[in-house]
Amino acid sequence: MDLLIRLPSYIQKSFVEQVRLLDRFSNKSTNGTLYLTATHLIFVESSTNNSTSAGQEIWILHHHIASVEKLSLTTTGCPLVIQCRNFRVVHFVVQRERDCHDIYSSLLRLLRPVSYEELYAFSYNPKQNDQQREEGWQLIDLGAEFERMGVPCDQWQLTDVNRDYKVCETYPRDLYVPITASKPIIVGSSKFRSKGRFPVLTYFYQEKKAAVCRCSQPLSGFSARCLEDESMLQAISKANHNSRFVYVMDTRPKLNALANRAAGKGYENEDNYSNIRFQFVGIENIHVMRTSLQKLLEVIGTRSLSVSDYLVGLESSGWLRHIKAVVDAAIFLTKAVTVEGASVLVHCSDGWDRTAQVCSLGSLLMDPYYRTIKGFMVLIEKDWISFGHKFADRCDQLDGDPKEVSPIFTQFLECVWQLTEQFPQAFEFSEWFLLQIHEHIHSCQYGNFLGNNQRQREELQLRERTHSLWAFLMSERQNYLNPFYSPAYSEAHPVLVPSTLPYNFKFWRNMYHQFDRSMHPRQSILKTILTLRENSRKAESTLQALESRLQQLGVTPITTSDPPAAPPTRDQRSNSSAFPPRPNSLILGAPINPKEVQRQQEEDDEQEEVGEEATESTDTERTVEGSSGTESRKQSYGELEGTYNSELAKEEPAVVSLEFGVARMTC
Amino acid sequence: AEEFSLMYPFFYRPMFEVIEDGWNSFLPKDAFKDLESMTDEWRLSEVNKDFSVCPSYPPLVAVPKDVDDDTLRKAATFRHSGRFPVLSYYHKKNGMVMMRAGQPLTGTNGRRCKEDEKLINATLRPGKRGYIIDTRTINVAQQAKARGGGFESEANYPQWRRIHKAIERSNVLQESLIKLVEACNDQSHSMDRWLSKLEASSWQTHVKEILTTACLAAQCIDREGASVLVHGTEGTDSTLQVTSLAQIILDPACRTIRGFQGLVEREWLQAGHPFRQRCAQSAYSNSKPRQEAPVFLLFLDCVWQILRQFPCSFEFSESFLVLLFEHAYASQFGTFLGNRTAERAKLSLPEKTVSLWSWVNRPQELERLSNPLFEANSLVIWPSVAPQSLLLWEGVFLRWNRSSRCLDEAYEEMVHIIEYNKELQNKVNSLRRQLAQLETEDPLLQTP
């Protein structure tokens, strides 16, 4: 661990022995040693007598730590509770209070970086040379992406008006506008929009020549108008011959938009703009979303949670309602563009939160490319990174205003996950891809999500000084593949039409309980099928080798080299059976770092581990209430207190921690 | 019998070839042969051969070897509906057992029955203690005394520790099902309304209660190394949910297609779950006959929850559970007719109707019901019962409300991947054999 060498001077103590890690939902605990490095907090379980393998390790990146809390001293030691931004919650008990305090105060220093230079990305070195790093950054090219959409074309052009970030400093340099939008129109319009975020193209639906444009709210107040802005919308309308009007989607609730008028902002007055159709869609603001997630996490973090409290909490948190609202808005956008062939202008207040959600999710529904691994990276790069979603503020990268923090991007990832559950064959990537991206919006390990906008990123020279996440994810592409993905499906269904009936939205356990292993299915279909796929690949090459060997020997192989015949098609099957198989949504298994999957599979091969893993989940639920620390090792499913036999209290065998893999990758 | 003889199963003639008559597939004496191969501590008693000791039991029941029929007769008078303690499951790993019964008829003055005490104590190894799992709250059990029922007192059963775990009674469960079905059919677009209706139905709460109690029973047996007696009031509803689910958790044999049929036969049909009364109406009907209750459906839902958590450990797929759900309510087969074995015998169901198992146990049907992901797992499987781990059984409750085409297609794709892999492995193996054969024939060919 060369990390130890660079230990900052304010780290009081680099390791503490005899630390107990308590399970969040059961009364189980493990003993081990806590190490503090410049970048990570590491818990290493002491190796147990009955196991030769090393104990589990938990690596927590300092940037992932959202809060550290020192609870009051108990008879067993000093409790330290750490909440992470990737929804991990760990509860340590340190024997000596002084040690606990040392770690606590060191962590407090570490988890509030005040300058970008302190972030991990600037010291992270994956042993690549400059050329490799440069190539990583070149992986995503937004110019090429607009070309792919068919832009520039006879109606849309690239404008250099923002080359020097003079018109809008939170927009990228390269922007696409209607050919009839002259510079004066652009500049005029930008002055009439919050933060200068005037209407620009973000997606072009070639088939109908319909455009998805985005901007911020107009500074209309109660009566102000701006001819250039009106011309701008007129230009967008004219660029599409398929429709006589443009939809203007204000993604805010009407009340919020009305309130903004008092501050000289507001929304478009239909009387002033010719040929627009104005629509509110009612997605709540960042503060509501932040509170909602907090509420949700509070509910699901409760021990011995009852089904009733869970469902009531799920409802009152409003989280799924908000998710549904975003998906509903994206569907509205998609229908307007693909069915009506109309262009749509999307905005909210500043046009970097709800607008980003709706534009990117809508594009994902319209264009199968965005449902591929590369395409999804491009989509995030375009609608989120380049158009200035404030990742630094929203993800709390630097010590800043807590009111700016909000899980807007997490919501976007969840919306995508909800869609993958409805359309298991439409996405090239699996849930693991979404989880990995989520991991890194907070890790500050790669440069991509640092800062709030492109201008700031250039100032920080991120391309020169940090590495790109996309290159890393691309190199691990195999691990994120969805084995059920069917390009043929996408060809047949280029536009997805999801159902938004409430029961289609589920709680995303693998995100919010990512690290609470006992909650997960004990066997994962995704994992199993991925392994099978891998085995098939190996078998294919073995088969080839065997065949050529036999041919060398002058023998015809008994079987032909054709790939095995496809099983009977669906239609043939369902005709012959009275009750067609009706699987539920294919549960995608525990989010494990794919490397870990391999490793675990190897282990499973050696020793039948399933059952032991299984027994672990017994302890998910403890209904023993109010048990004190000393009598903590009570049984799982309740009421066995005062057992005659101490069997139940036995320590579970060590299980390799899931999170180990994820953390490993970050070092 | 009038009402029965006009029912569809009596007119139905199979259009398929019966390979194995399902009526003879799961006879108690065959099940006992399996037990005999593991232990000689139990015997098959004919005390109930004319259904006079316990009308809802089958003619043959497994009881401790050292307990004679007279003792059983006396114990039966002390248990609700004559349901004296009988063997439900023998845990091969440690020889512990699970028994089930009706409530003891202690009444308000604390009646006791030496024979009953002797019977259940006979199942304990020397010096060992057992657990009695009462599926009622202590209050409900107390109230039962006023009606002649009750529970085992510590004084009279010192070797047993009683645990109360509340599972709701049938009328509450039916109410819950009606609310759930209504919630699922509500197509209003509000998320809050859906979640609050789902919560108000309490269905998932019941699923959790039942699973938790079953896990507790399994835990006592496997982890604690103790024998268990399970009962509620009658011993025909919540008792069976617990004993059958505990076996799913403990016994890999119950997770096969045939083993699961055997489990349904033993723990539901032969054990006297009153299917005629409980499944008189469709689950989607909102009328409320007095005895109607989705007790069996809840059991299937719980199995489905475990299946979702251990998708590779079951030989059958979800479609088998859906099939059982459908046939329990309405069927061309005679299997789920009647309330108990005595009734089925009186109606001559085995002679006059076709068994569902005759239909199921044919190669084409077995293939359709099988789980492509199955890999035998000989271990005990402990499900998570956290609310976040429990799901709504969409295959039943949302079946008619949403299209499952996308999911079905993905499922087909999964089957394709699995079959392709199998074929590849077979080819590789056959070529390896061919090569090995050549090499033994001609040693010069041997590759380094």
Image (cartoon, rainbow, N blue to C red):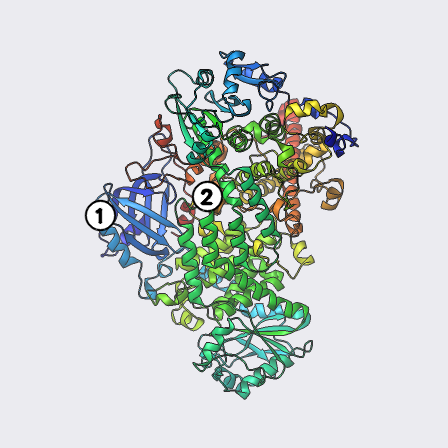
> Would you name the residue on which mark 1 appears?
A99
Please report, as a chain letter, where disc 2 is located.
B
Q: What element carries label 2?
A: loop
Q: Quadrant of the N terminus of chain B?
A: top right
Where is residue B35 shown, x and y percent of the image?
55, 18
Residue A172 seen in this snapshot: no
Where is residue B45 shown, x and y percent of the image?
57, 14
Q: Is A588 positioned to the left or the right of A545 in the image?
A: left
Point 76% across, 40% down: residue: A576
Q: Quadrant of the C terminus of chain B?
A: top right
> Would you name the residue on which mark 2 appears?
B386
Point 48% across, 44% down: residue: A520
Residue B9 vs residue A181, the one in the foreground: B9
Spot the residue most to the left. Answer: A98
The answer to which quarter of the image holds residue A379 is bottom right
Please report, as a chain letter, where disc 1 is located.
A
